[in-house]
């Protein structure tokens, strides 16, 4: 059973930093693209960072220059370093990954971790 587990969320003051982690476990061949999404109350999830197997990241303009994503293919983990946090970054953050097993590739989601930016 493949699982993605996020950690590292919490409460931080505006301007502060927080580091999220995502770890994949279970039986699979490899992980293709890994992503971070966030979801505001009553809204659809939006992409925060996307990292290919080669480690090259993509960020939307809303977080570019503040958020830094990285991954470790040997450990099947991904991190999101969030700097200069703003109250509008408050959301539930989700890890997502396209994981390949012997038969097919499918997307998996973590359970989400709450990030609250408030003074």
Image (cartoon, rainbow, N blue to C red):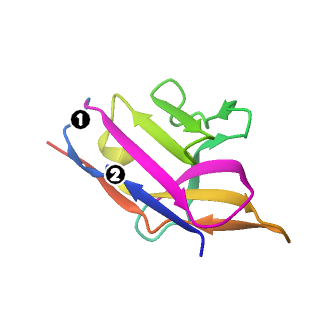
Q: Where are the magenta residues, as a range?
A: 16-39
Disc 1 crowd, CA 10 A, few/some/many (<14, 14-19, 20+) = some
| Front-most of residues 81 and 84 | 81
Main SS of residues in magenta: strand
Q: Earlier in the sequence, mark 2 or mark 1?
A: 1
| Front-most of residues 21 and 46 | 21
Q: Which mark is residue 96?
A: none
Compared to residue 100, the image places residue 57 above or below, namely above
| Front-most of residues 63 and 81 | 81
SS under mark 1: loop
Q: Indicate the quadrant where residue 87 lies.
A: top left
Q: Residue furthest bottom?
A: 1
Q: Residue at x 42, y 34 (%)?
A: 81
The answer for how far apart the CA atoms under marks 2 and 1 are is: 10 Å
Q: Left or right: where does residue 116 sit relative to residue 22?
A: left
The picture places residue 91, in percent across and down from the top left corner, at 38, 56
Q: Residue furthest left?
A: 119
SS under mark 2: loop
Q: Read off the residue under disc 2.
A: 90
Compared to residue 45, the image places residue 53 above or below, namely above
33 inside magenta stretch:
yes
Q: Read off the residue under disc 1.
A: 14
Compared to residue 24, the image places residue 69 above or below, namely above
Q: Indicate the quadrant where residue 3 lies.
A: bottom right
The picture places residue 59, in percent across and down from the top left corner, at 61, 35
Q: Left or right: where does residue 2 sit relative to residue 30?
A: left
| Front-most of residues 26 and 81 | 26
Q: Residue at x 53, y 35 (%)?
A: 69
Q: Left or right: where does residue 25 sit relative to residue 86?
A: right
Q: Indicate the quadrant where residue 101 lies.
A: bottom right
Q: Residue at x 38, y 45 (%)?
A: 89
């Amino acid at each position: 059973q493949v699982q993605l587990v996020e950690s590292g969320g919490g409460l931080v003051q505006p301007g502060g930093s927080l580091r999220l982690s995502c770890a994949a476990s279970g039986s699979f061949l490899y992980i293709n693209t890994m992503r971070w999404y966030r979801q505001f109350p009553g809204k659809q999830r939006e992409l925060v960072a996307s990292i290919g197997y080669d480690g090259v990241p993509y960020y939307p303009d809303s977080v570019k220059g503040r958020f830094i994503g990285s991954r470790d293919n040997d450990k099947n983990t991904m991190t999101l370093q969030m700097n200069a946090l703003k109250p509008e970054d408050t959301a539930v953050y989700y890890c997502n990954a396209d994981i390949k097993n012997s038969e097919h590739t499918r997307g998996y989601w973590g359970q989400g971790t709450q990030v609250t930016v408030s003074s």
